[in-house]
Image: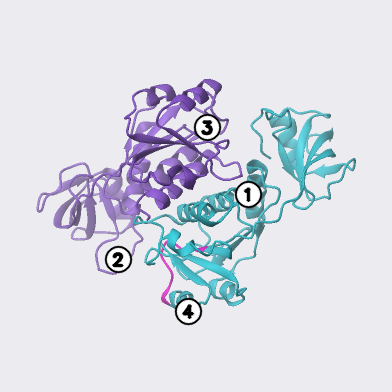
Chain colours: A purple, B cyan
Amino acid sequence: MAGSGREHDDGRSAVRLFVEAPLEAGTAVALASGQAHYLRNVMRQAPGGRVRLFNGRDGEWEGAIETLAPNRATARPVERLAAQPPTPDLRLLFTPLKSERTRFVVEKATELGVGVIHPVLTQYGQTRRVNLERLRAHAIEAAEQCGRLEVPRIAPPCPLPDALGDWLPERRLLVCDPEARSTMAEAVEGDSGASWAILIGPEGGFAPAERRLLADHPAAVPARLGPRILRAETAVAAALACWQTLAGDWR
Amino acid sequence: MAGSGREHDDGRSAVRLFVEAPLEAGTAVALASGQAHYLRNVMRQAPGGRVRLFNGRDGEWEGAIETLAPNRATARPVERLAAQPPTPDLRLLFTPLKSERTRFVVEKATELGVGVIHPVLTQYGQTRRVNLERLRAHAIEAAEQCGRLEVPRIAPPCPLPDALGDWLPERRLLVCDPEARSTMAEAVEGDSGASWAILIGPEGGFAPAERRLLADHPAAVPARLGPRILRAETAVAAALACWQTLAGDWR
């Protein structure tokens, strides 16, 4: 759930809700219990109030709250505001971090336009525990807040070699590595039309076997992120922002 | 305090500590009580153990722990590893957020090479409360971790008009604004030799009077950060990373 509490300049609701059901004019959809609670107790809404609805397939809809109980609510799509755009082709591979920092990674990746978020397990990673449900909830909340019309897919975690083994040949893999010779601009420049994935390793670095695997990988393009040592979640936000400005939808 | 617990490849300590005292060969310096606790209980160090020391003025030193009690410790600088570099000229102006997100801003700004971090109060800001001591502690910890040899200065908070009133004429002010016509690259390109400050407004946007002030300001250069709505702390990390890659020390 996300909204500033104020309406947009165009009078439309600033509250955006992600739903699972199909969206079509006049067919009411059930909201999640957390959304019902949010509308009722945080946003002080009532039946008849306006919301915006999206489900990652049917575009964005202006809707009206139809029923609103403490933990149950329905909303009826009224008018389609925008068609569904293509899902962003950018992928993020990252090593799971402690809970709050992993949340940050998912939130920032969503805001910065990633299509698929893939936790990969590495030898020097901090943790191997990933709660996919929770990651998806963070992604939904961030998508509601940032205006996206789809929620990035969270791919099930797997070891780095497995993630690299089954690789589309046309997808570049930007490997963020403090020891790389190329800057971000040098690595991405001239290849901005390609499909890309960005890999952020663990703060302890890649293990020797992982380094060899990456050095030999035909899709790998190494790049460094400046002269200072970045925390992993800083590297995620920084690499994604640079990529969007060099080759993505910030141009 | 920051360290991976392992030594660097060159055998030097990975534990970096910021101290206030002058650093010169052979003259022991007092460590803060939190640093003593960290060395003793987290890093399991003992007298004779190695640390790296910096104070923002005298470069980086390899040092030896001399005394180590539960809340008191001293270390003796042994060898100077690096001269003090010039302080980065980049400034960040940001609107204070809730505690955890402000911490994030200070941490990321430190990692991403900001010289002065200036909280500015705006009409639609979330909060006017700023704990300067705590912000400085976050900046010190991030500087220790990221390998910087200085801690960014935290300027005392003031209203945005005051911050903009007393402005060096040669310093550009990059105003991150979702409604700007220029991209980051267009705004910064061709002017990368200049001094810069980056202003991130509140999530509620600038008030009309603030907008007028910024539109009329001779140093202001507006730029947008892509098509999605970014949280304020995401905008900070994204704008700083883009600036460093377009005009700063990531080139």
Q: In what element is the residue under mark 3?
A: loop
- Camera-near label (2 vs 3) is 3
Residue wearing tag 2: A8
How far apart are labels 4 and 1 at the CA level? 35 Å
How far apart are labels 4 and 2 at the CA level? 25 Å
Mark 4 or 1, nearer chain start = 1
How far apart are labels 3 and 1 at the CA level? 22 Å
| Residue type beneath disc 3 | Pro
Residue wearing tag 3: A202
Magenta-drawn stretch, dominant element (helix, strand or loop): loop
- Camera-near label (4 vs 2) is 4
Q: Give the range drawn in magenta.
A: B199-208
| Residue type beneath disc 2 | His
Residues beneath discs 4 and 2 located on the same chain = no
Identified at 17% across, 47% down, the residue is A58
Residues beneath discs 2 and 3 located on the same chain = yes
**The disc label shown at residue B138, or none:** 1
- Camera-near label (3 vs 1) is 3
| Residue type beneath disc 1 | His
Direction right: furthest residue: B26
